[in-house]
Image (cartoon, rainbow, N blue to C red):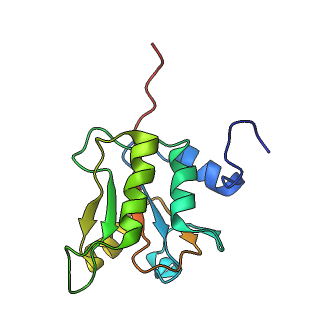
Amino acid sequence: MLKSIDPLLGPDLLATLRAMGHGDDIVIADANFPAATTGRPLIRLDGVDAVRILDAVLSVMPLDTFTPDAAWRMEVVGDPTAEMPIFGEFRRVMAAREGESFRLASLERFAFYERARNAFAVVVSGERRLYGNIILKKGIVRPEA
């Protein structure tokens, strides 16, 4: 255990987040996501929902402020404007951790898979809600004034 570090952030996930550079992506994937086929390093957090993992990750990792978007969700197949309940939960956590300026962009299913194949790593959650996937782009930690 460490002070002020969410206990969900175990050694593998902490090391991954620390090793990522500015502009690298990390995927938080639901239980249905084809994570193993991405070819990216996998961190398994089975039994933990994606929203909880998102909150833990954003407690230590900033989102990128140099790009128009720093977080993406997968569009609902056949209805790209559909709003799944988990999307609102993702937005709530992002706003609480990073502020209201970040939007949750969307990617078509196969574009999402392609971006995941180029990510630094994939965190596999136990999330059972459909479309419980999110990609985050790491930002920089600014020096304190």
Q: Which residue is drawn at 41% across and 49% down?
A: 94
For image coordinates 20% across by 82% down, the residue present is 79
Tell me where residue 135 sits by quadrant. bottom left
Q: Residue at x 36, y 46 (%)?
A: 23
Q: Is residue 143 above or below residue 115?
A: above
Q: In this view, does 100 lie to the left or right of 6?
A: left
Q: Nearer the viewer, residue 13 or 49?
A: 49
Measuring from the top left, give residue 21's x and y in whole percent. 45, 43
**x%, y% of residue 13?**
62, 55
Q: Residue furthest top?
A: 145
- The residue located at (49%, 77%) in the rendering is 35
Q: Is residue 135 visible?
A: no
Residue 90 visible here: yes
Q: Position of residue 100 (x, y in %)?
A: 32, 42
**In this orientation, which residue lies closer to the viewer: 41 or 122?**
122
Residue 81 appears left or right of 140: left
Residue 48 vertical placement versus 56 (above, below): below
Image quarter in which the C terminus is found:
top left
Residue 116 appears in which quarter of the rendering? bottom left
In-image side of 112 versus 134 (left or right): left
